Amino acid sequence: MTHDVVMFAKKTLVVLGAGAAHEVGFPLGLELRDRIRELADSTFITRRDDDRERKVRLALEHGDYEEEAFKLRDGLSGVKSIDDFIDMHSSDTRLARLAKVLIAAILLEAEQGCDISEDAEIFSFDKPSTVDGSCYNELWHILKDGVRKETVDGLFADVRIVSFNYERSLEWFLFNRIRNTFQISDRQALDVLGTLQILRPYGGLGSLDTQHADRVPFAGGFSGHTVARCAEKIRTFSEGVADEELSAAVSHAVNESEIVVMLGLGFHETNLRLLRRTRANVRRKVYATAYGFSEPNTIEIENRIGRLFVRESYDAHKNAPEHPRFREMFVEDMTCQKLLAHYQLPLSASRL
């Protein structure tokens, strides 16, 4: 009898929040919010004449956005994320445009300084990786388990991803790992990466694929034109919910999943609604990080995602058997990396 070893043991949906990208150097919600406030002020209120500010003004065609900059600088302190603020002011299209341009500029800049940029040299042979302790590395070890160079085209056969992040750090990381681990060309690695379905309810900064019209190089610097292009691809909460085709694709990914892995989420109600499944009472297991949450909040998180993914009547107090074999929910006060490492064997168990 032969063992057909697969990367994930069953059809798996991985849901990514800002906490996952934070493990490779990207800002969390509060930090992103504060960087936006600072950049709004320096670009349109104090009008600093640095290169970054000039590029942002160019992206907005040198329009007068001082009023909107004041709104962002002074209003953002009352919310936890930029997304919340834009959604509260969804009828203000100029405010939304400025916010999207600032988000794009900050994330493109963050790519250059993150742990997996070209300058970080994380994939060089003679330099220890700065991301060995990240969730991306743990995810990679699960994905590649049992995959040979001859079968690399099927690397992502049993996994789908829903990302609530705008940035492309996971794609960049996987591209490099595929290319270097399996010793294939850039083109082959990009083709393999292209088989991974990544659903982005709120859009993203652009493709890494050199053959795509919306390609934006990772950590390649940015111009005013690049910022403007990337900003056009970013969606607000309201815009994400209104995309019926994408919402249907997310529902399908949820319905098909036998395992759900939730990494680095803040469990925003709008995000959870987008994940609402349409096929009830399908047996699946859910693994989720609740790093830094209090015990009452963690119980409520378990109830919310239990009702989403396990059964509509899920109750954390009634539906949590003591023996792990019978548990369906694993909500842990762990970082994303630690959760994947802790449950690596259950997630990557082989099929006979």
Image (tube, grey):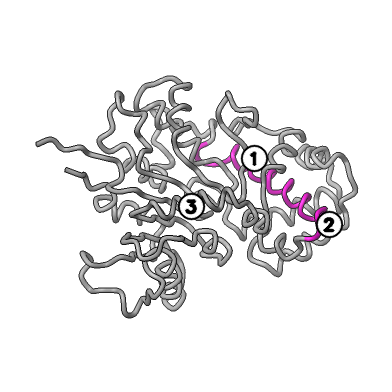
Q: Nearer the viewer, residue 272 or 134?
A: 272
Give amino acid for label 1: Leu
Measure the C-alpha gap from mark 1 to mark 3: 19 Å
Secondary structure state at the residue bearing disc 2: helix
Q: Which of pointers 2 and 3 lies earlier in the amino acid sequence?
A: 3
Q: Which of pointers 1 and 3 lies earlier in the amino acid sequence?
A: 3
Give amino acid for label 2: Glu
Q: Nearer the viewer, residue 268 or 12?
A: 12
Measure the C-alpha gap from mark 2 to mark 3: 30 Å
The residue that disc 3 covers is 16
The residue that disc 2 covers is 68
Q: Nearer the viewer, mark 2 or mark 3?
A: 3
- Magenta stretch in the rendered image: 91-116
* Picture residue at 21% right of the left edge, 44% below the top: 350
Which residue is most to the front? 279
Magenta stretch holds residue 102: yes
Residue 254: give its label: none
Q: Nearer the viewer, residue 255 or 267?
A: 255
Q: Are marks 1 and 2 in contact (CB under 8 Å)?
A: no
Q: x, y (%) of residue 322?
A: 23, 74
Q: Quadrant of the C terminus?
A: top left
Q: Main secondary structure of the magenta part?
A: helix
Measure the C-alpha gap from mark 1 to mark 2: 22 Å
Count residues near mark 3 (Cα–Cα under 10 Å), then give few for <14, some for 14-19, many for 20+.
many
